Image (spheres, rainbow, N blue to C red):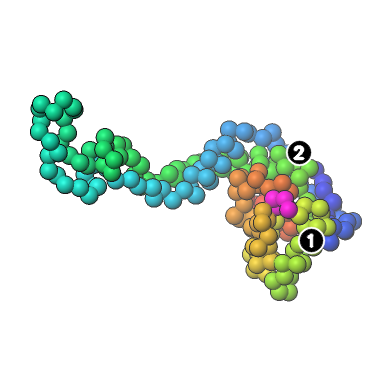
């Protein structure tokens, strides 16, 4: 599969970029994508939720009323869950939501996500570029040249381009990442995937 290489101004350079068939041309595996996206979202959870149970709330330990003869149910503690201000029954406790997946399965998931993007024509190849200084205006101009302003965009570079990252960080829905940090969820979450030409080699080394 070949795609035209564009400049950041949206112009065609005349060059063609070859997309590796073993990555962008495979039959996507939906279950692998599901597991990898599920792991990514689970790893984002802090797991710090906590509610107080009967033994943790503040309150008197004095028996509220006599055991028998009141005509109502027995009650031994104001901290009982049946009373307002009492402890919660089986409330949430801090926990770790993260779980592990096999490396090969995660690779398959990323390849499947890239294959979907290639199949839906949602990949744009950019020639290598950099900014001399952080300029959000330059980045917005680039997005406007591809008519994707206001949409979710993922720009993949080969190395960390500090000025490019700083230029994009204030633009809602737009993210800059490197080929090494590419993950399934971010690929699928983007409406348009911009791959810098030099990042293709990194992606092939990691996934092919």
In percent of width and height, residue 36 lies at 55, 41
In the image, taking residue 208 as reference, residue 62 lies left or right, namely left
Residue drawn 69% across and 71% down?
Answer: 134
Against 53, is 196 above or below? below
The structure residue drawn at horizontal position 26% and vertical position 42%, both measured from the top left corner, is 86
Question: Residue visible at 35% across and 42% down?
Answer: 92
Q: CA distance from mark 2 to mark 1?
A: 24 Å
Left of 151 or right of it: where is 70? left
Residue 142 in the image: state x and y as whole percent: 79, 61
| Left or right of 206 on screen, residue 63 | left
Looking at the rendered image, the quarter that the N terminus falls into is: top right
- Is 127 included in the stretch rendered in magenta? no
Outermost bottom residue: 132
Q: Which disc is residue 10 wearing?
A: none
Main SS, magenta region, reads loop
Depth order, front residue of 18/3? 3
Percent x, y of residue 188: 65, 43
Q: Which residue bears the numbered disc 1?
A: 142
Q: In the image, which is nearer the foreground, mark 2 or mark 1?
A: 1
| Residue 159 can be seen in this image | no
* Residue stretch rendered in magenta on the structure: 150-154
**Is 104 above or below relative to 140?**
above
Secondary-structure class at tag 1: helix
Tell me the element at label 2.
Answer: helix
Q: Residues within 10 Å of mark 1 (few under 14, many from 20)?
A: some
Which sits in the foreground, 79 or 107?
79
Which quadrant holds residue 37?
Answer: top right
Closer to us: 81 or 151: 81
Mark 2 crowdedness (10 Å alpha carbons): few <14, some 14-19, many ≥20? few
Quarter of the image for residue 130 reads bottom right
Q: Where does label 2 land, which residue?
A: 119
């Amino acid at each position: 599969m070949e795609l035209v290489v564009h400049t950041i101004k949206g112009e065609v350079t005349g060059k063609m970029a070859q997309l590796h068939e073993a990555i962008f041309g495979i039959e996507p595996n939906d279950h692998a994508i599901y597991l990898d996206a599920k792991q990514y979202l689970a790893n984002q959870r802090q797991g710090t939720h906590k509610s107080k149970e009967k033994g943790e709330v503040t309150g008197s330990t004095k028996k509220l009323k006599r055991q028998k003869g009141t005509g109502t149910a027995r009650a031994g503690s104001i901290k009982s869950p049946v009373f307002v201000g009492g402890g919660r029954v089986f409330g949430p406790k801090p926990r770790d939501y993260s779980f592990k997946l096999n490396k090969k399965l995660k690779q398959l998931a990323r390849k499947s996500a890239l294959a979907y993007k290639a199949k839906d024509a949602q990949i744009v190849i950019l020639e290598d570029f950099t900014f001399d200084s952080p300029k959000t205006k330059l980045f917005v101009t680039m997005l406007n040249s591809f008519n994707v302003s206001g949409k979710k965009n993922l720009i993949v570079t080969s190395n960390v381009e500090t000025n490019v990252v700083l230029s994009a960080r204030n633009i809602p829905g737009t993210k800059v990442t490197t080929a090494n940090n590419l993950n399934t969820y971010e690929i699928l979450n983007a409406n348009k995937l911009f791959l810098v030409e030099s990042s293709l080699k990194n992606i092939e080394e990691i996934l092919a």
